[in-house]
Image (spheres, rainbow, N blue to C red):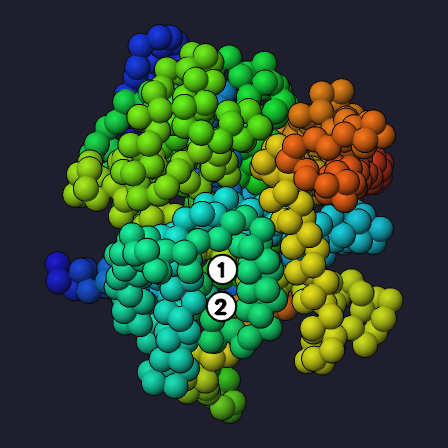
Amino acid sequence: MFNDLSRFGKYLGQAARLMVGLPDYETYVAHMRATHPELPVMNETDFFRNRQEARYGAGRSGGCC
Amino acid sequence: MNIVSKHAIWWLLTAVGVFSLGIVALSRGETINALWIVTAAVSIYLVAYRYYSLFIADRVMQLDPTRATPAVRHNDGLDYVPTNKYILFGHHFAAIAGAGPLVGPVLAAQMGYLPGTLWIIVGVVLAGAVQDFMVLFVSTRRDGRSLGDLIKSELGFVPGIIALFGTFMIMVIILAVLALIVVKALAESPWGTFTVAATIPIAMFMGVYNRFIRPGRVGEISIVGFVLLIAAIIVGGQVAESATWAPLFTFNGKQLTWMLIIYGFVASVLPVWLLLAPRDYLSTFLKIGTIVGLALCMVYVAPNLRMPAVTQFVDGTGPAWSGSLFPFIFITIACGAVSGFHALISSGTTPKLLDNEKNARMIGYGGMLMESFVAIMAIVAASVIDPGVYFAMNSPPAVIGKTVEGAAQVISQWGFVITPEVLVQTARDVGENSILSRAGGAPTLAVGMAQIFSQVFGGQTMMAFWYHFAILFEALFILTACDAGTRAGRFMLQDLLGTFVPSFKQTNSWPANLTATGLCVAAWGYILYQGVVDPLGGINSLWPLFGISNQMLAGVALMLCTVVLFKMKRQKYAWVTIVPACWLLVCTLTAGWEKVFHANPKIGFLALADKFQAALDRGEILAPAKSVEQMQQIVFNNHLDAVLATFFIFVVVSMLFYTIIACLKAMRDQKVTTSEMPYQAMPTAKA
């Protein structure tokens, strides 16, 4: 049950972060390792900054209603 | 399992829904409990989700779980990530929910709770959720491309450009009307102004923390930010009572307008990490938290509805906004029933995160049902307050005067008996000097929310806190929308102008950036300003313009889906989109026409312009204008509004023309002619 709870908590955290446009960092790292092992992987800070810029950059509508 | 027991629970739920709706619809003269509305809405949503969205998924669109989605094909861990459906549901809902579903129903409550409630429930099931779901599907099958691109590829280049211009104008109107709501809520309110102003340094502190101190720790700093916000509300109460501080935060509408315009300009050229991003975190979490909290409190409190089911204002003589039930209720409640803006979200980030086509049903259709529930809560919140208070807050001074005595007299004559003492006491309860003529939805909603919240936490003494909490909650995400919208509008404009002047396209060039931002702010700022000085209160002219344009965009999105169905050779199911599209076209074209040409100056822009022009010719000055220049300004503004409404009519009629042509062409073709990405199977083993 505690396993379920901690998984639920993890999901909740991921959901909250994605609501503000921040995808999961671990998923990104796992993906890069699995499919592009030759490419450099951003560290967590760069990843965060990259996603922040992307969310408010060109091509995003206001999304206000 | 046999067919009877499989469907029995749904039959039961249908019966509950119909019975509750019957109670809501047929009660006259006696007060009913808000939970009847909530029960009716939720049961109907569940049944519609179980059957109608399944029908659309399996028969109409034939979702294919074996087909790889853009998130799977282009997975990069950044923009394209296959995402758990519940997590994506949260993302999608946070993106579509905003001020729209809160304000529209509050304004619509002047006709009573029944017309609005029925339109919200029927509209979402047959139009709004269908649109969100189908656009999500169409975009997912086309690499997650945007609505403008989809229209270009399915209907042609010219309709694509027309739609792009239309979308830009809609954005300008939305920003103006949202900013107007903030102005109306904060005018002459030092408490509200202080708390909203305090969000700027709070957000900047969060931004610096996230940039330099502990990057990426959004959760912890958002909690700190939330605590600071609550502190700002408490301090705001002290500020409002202080003789030295209160005047420093007391502004009239025009001053606030200028502040918002300057703020909008500065905020949208600052780096995003400093102000926009952290305030977005605060406003998103506050928004979701407050919506969940309001739902729980509403069920716990189970308030009675004090607004009549139907008021005499269905004839079009309402004080908050003018125009008869048809077509105006259908454009006043836009988001919550159907909103074209969602087509932009459904063709934005969501399709790039969808892990499997079959989940589009829960996210597209289900997400919109959730938004509709927010609209239901808003109409309930507006209907639990004393109708006399409601009309005092939503009528312009030209109708009820500027004193509580005069207002109470006028409103009591309408049949909503209220005393001046109640109006004064209500203002005192919520910590304001006056509650008269605060149209715009936010303050009314805040009074309703304060009544509900204070019955759970804190009682009467906490009313003022909850009122300003609700105002802050709305102002915060409206400001975020203004900021993000100005930025998005700037990129759109740079793109559009770039087709004529190529140097505009360079988004890292400061002159190009500042010019495009300036143009964008000037566009919504001008419309906002005219709304603030409008003789009928601004909301009366701007909200219908917003509603018309937003519903027209929904019509355009549904027409796009119709074309796609024809091209897929599924035209026998095309009624699923044709019926709501036709209804939206009928409503918006009628409303657009009436807003331009109606003989009543309270409804028609040209009639109002003529009225002021005629007075000018006679050498008279009509209130609220104080000079000849202001009179001329009002004449010009109303001509401008008429041009805008005509422009939207042109957009939608031309889209209809191109849709019919595309459908006829698709019917003549023997084979399927959609421009979907070719089928690619879902990888069987997950990487």
Q: Secondary structure at mark 2?
A: helix
* Residue that numbered label 1 is attached to: B480
Please, is residue B655 above or below residue B416 in the view? below
Could you tell me if residue B577 is visible in this image?
A: no
Q: Residue at x 69, y 73 (%)?
A: B514
Q: Which part of the image, by quadrant, shows the N terminus of chain B?
A: top left
Instruction: Specify few, some or many for label 1: CA neighbours under 10 Å numbering under 14, 14-19, or 20 or more.
Output: many
Could you tell me if residue B469 is visible in this image?
A: yes
Q: Secondary structure at mark 1?
A: helix
* Image location (x, y in percent) of residue B540: 61, 33
Q: CA distance from mark 2 to mark 1?
A: 7 Å
* Image location (x, y in percent) of residue B77: 47, 74
Q: Residue at x 31, y 26 (%)?
A: B422
Q: Type of residue at label 1?
A: Thr
Task: Judge from the rendering whether residue B26 lies leftward or rightward of residue B154; answer left or right.
Answer: left
Task: Judge from the rendering whether residue A39 lies leftward or rightward of residue B630; answer left or right.
Answer: left
* Residue that numbered label 2 is attached to: B276
Instruction: Specify few, some or many for label 2: CA neighbours under 10 Å numbering under 14, 14-19, or 20 or more.
Output: many
Please, is residue B290 above or below residue B69 in the view? above
Q: Are marks 2 and 1 on the same chain?
A: yes
Residue situated in front as seen by the camera: B153 or B208: B208
Q: Type of residue at label 2?
A: Leu
Q: Residue at x 48, y 53 (%)?
A: B251
Question: Dot 1 falls on which chain?
Answer: B
Residue situated in front as seen by the camera: B240 or B467: B240
Pointer 2 and pointer 1: residues touching (CB < 8 Å)? Answer: yes
Residue situated in front as seen by the camera: A34 or B615: B615
* Image location (x, y in percent) of residue B307: 38, 20
